[in-house]
Image (tube, helix red, strand yellow):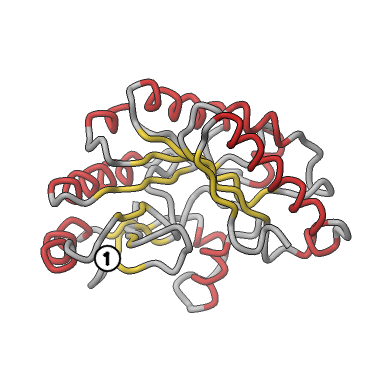
Amino acid sequence: MDTIMRKTMLYKTGVEYGDYTMNHVLGCSHGCLYPCYAFLMAKRFGKVKNYEKWCEPKLVSNTLEILDREIPRLKAKIKSVQLCFTTDPFMYGYEEIGEISMKSIKKLNSAGIRCTVLTKGILPIVLADYSSNNEYGITLISLNEDYRKRIEPGAASYKERIDALKALSKRGCKTWVSIEPYPTPNLIQQDLTAVLEAVSFANRIIFGRTNYSKEISAYAKHKAFYNKQASIVIQFCKKRGIDYHIKNGTKT
C-alpha cells in the first residue's frame, strides 16, 4: 500500500469521551456512507480529492519513529490514547495497518499509557496479551448484513466484529461498543434491543445519533426517535450493570 510521512502523531482530541489520539493512516477502505465525518473533513481541507481516493488508505511509514520522540515528552499529560478517530487501526484486509497498530500499542503500554481501540475490522486475539488496562471496541449500528454492505461496504461483517470482541472479553479484556451513528427507521427498520443483546457481554456502550445526513433531517420524528432509543440504551445498561455514555446532542 502507499505510504506518507508525518511530523507529529499524538494529539489532544476534542471528542467528549476521549483524551489523546493517534491517526497513523490517511483514508479508510471501509468507505462508510453515513456520511463519514472524517472523510468530509479530509476533503474539505484538501487531504484527499474525492471518495475514491479516501478509500485508498495510505499508511504513515514513520509512525513508530514519531512515537519514540513524542511519548517521552507527552506521557505525563496523557491519560489514554485512542486508536483511532479519523481512520481504522485494524482496517479490514490490511494486515500492515494492524501490525503498526499493535506495535504502537506496545510502545504506549511500555510507557504506562493505556490504549483504547475502536474498529470496524477484526480485533486480533493477541491483544489479550497486552496491558490489562487497554480497552477494545467495535462499532456496531445494526445486525443486518444487507444494510452493512450498503452503508459500510468495505468493513468486516457484523458477526466477525462481534465474535472477535467476544473472544477478547472471554480472555478478560475490557471491551466496549460504539452504537453510532445509529440509523433512523427511514434508513432501516430494526430493533435496538437486539443489537444491545448481541453485545451484552461488553463493559461499556456508547450511543449516538447520525449527523450530517439529509435523510435524517427528512425524518420528521428523528428527535423523538433518538430520545426513545437513548432511553432504551440507558435502561438496558442499568439493568445489566453495563457502563454507558449517550453522546452529546443525541437526546433533546
Q: Residue at x 30, y 43 (%)?
A: 96
Looking at the picture, how far across and down is residue 75, in whole percent? Answer: 17, 61
Tell me if residue 76 comes above or below residue 138 in the rendering: below
The residue wearing badge 1 is 9
**To which quarter of the image does residue 221 belong?**
bottom right
Quarter in which the C terminus is drawn = bottom right
Front residue of 3/118: it is 118
Q: Residue furthest bottom?
A: 45
Q: Residue at x 39, y 54 (%)?
A: 84
Tell me if residue 135 comes above or below residue 78 in the rendering: above
Looking at the picture, how far across and down is residue 241, in whole percent? Answer: 52, 32
**To which quarter of the image does residue 132 belong?**
top left
Looking at the picture, how far across and down is residue 237, in whole percent? Answer: 59, 36
Q: Residue at x 88, y 60 (%)?
A: 220
Looking at the picture, how far across and down is residue 244, in whole percent? Answer: 54, 44
Left or right, 138 with reference to 223 = left
